[in-house]
Amino acid sequence: MNAQFTPLREPVNLGDLLKYEEGRLNYSREQVTVASGQNLELGAVVGRVTATGKLKRFDPVATDGTEDVAGILLGAVDATLIQRDDALLLARHAIVASNAVVWPVGITTEQKAAAVAALEARGILIRQSA
């Protein structure tokens, strides 16, 4: 008998993304507001709109503040219809797995390298993962 098995594919979870964070009083995390019109995945790299302080997907060619990396989301956030005030942002001192970080579509190698450097300046290190 030759049985065929379909591999089980689980969605990415927080354990896949976050490998280390400073544990004292959630020092690495911030509760933040995601602007309406956004549907962001766990691990999405985000920027902060200067005028509102709300988060949107990182956009390296924007001029509204989202061209500067603010951190990485620690959970999926659907703010398609209304802003969400309950998002968790990984803002500092942590290690994340490269395969779970979600970059904007069309990002160039140079833009990604600059964003990685900006994350490193915040103490967020991206490490190769299996």
Image (cartoon, rainbow, N blue to C red):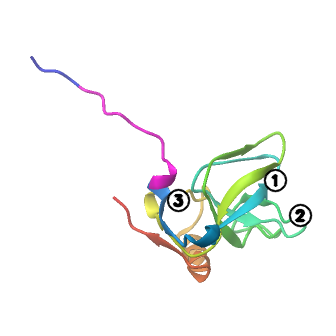
Which element type, helix, strand or loop, lies under badge 3? loop
Residue positioned 30% across, 28% down in the render: 6
Ranked by sequence position, the earlier of labels 1 and 2 is 1
**Mark closer to the chain start, 3 or 2:** 2
Q: Residue furthest bottom?
A: 121
Find the distance from the CA under tag 3 to the CA under tag 1. 20 Å
Q: Are marks 1 and 2 in contact (CB under 8 Å)?
A: yes
Q: Residue at x 37, y 62 (%)?
A: 129
- 72 in the magenta segment: no
SS category of the residue bearing label 2: loop
Q: Is residue 17 left or right of residue 40?
A: left
* Disc 3/disc 2 C-alpha distance (Å): 25 Å
Q: How dense is the environment of label 3, judged by Cα within 10 Å: few (below 14), some, or many (20 and up)?
A: some
Q: Please state the extent of the stretch shown in magenta in the rendering.
A: 5-15
Q: Amino acid at mark 1?
A: Ala
Q: Is 117 situated above or below 80? A: below
- Residue at 55% of width from left, 70% of height from top? 23
Q: What residue did someone put label 3 on?
A: 101
Work out how far the residue at label 1 is from the one at label 2, CA to CA, in angstroms. 9 Å
Q: Does residue 61 appear to the left or right of 102 in the view shown?
A: right
Dot 1 falls on a residue whose secondary structure is loop
- Horizontal relation, residue 123 to residue 81: left or right: left
Pointers 3 and 2 in contact (C-beta within 8 Å): no
Q: Amino acid at mark 2?
A: Thr
**Considering depth in this image, is 103 or 10 the residue closer to the camera?**
10
Overall secondary structure of the magenta section: loop
Q: x, y (%) of residue 17?
A: 49, 57
Which residue carries the number 1 mark?
35
- Locate the C terminus by quadrant: bottom left
Query: Which residue carries the number 2 mark?
Result: 52
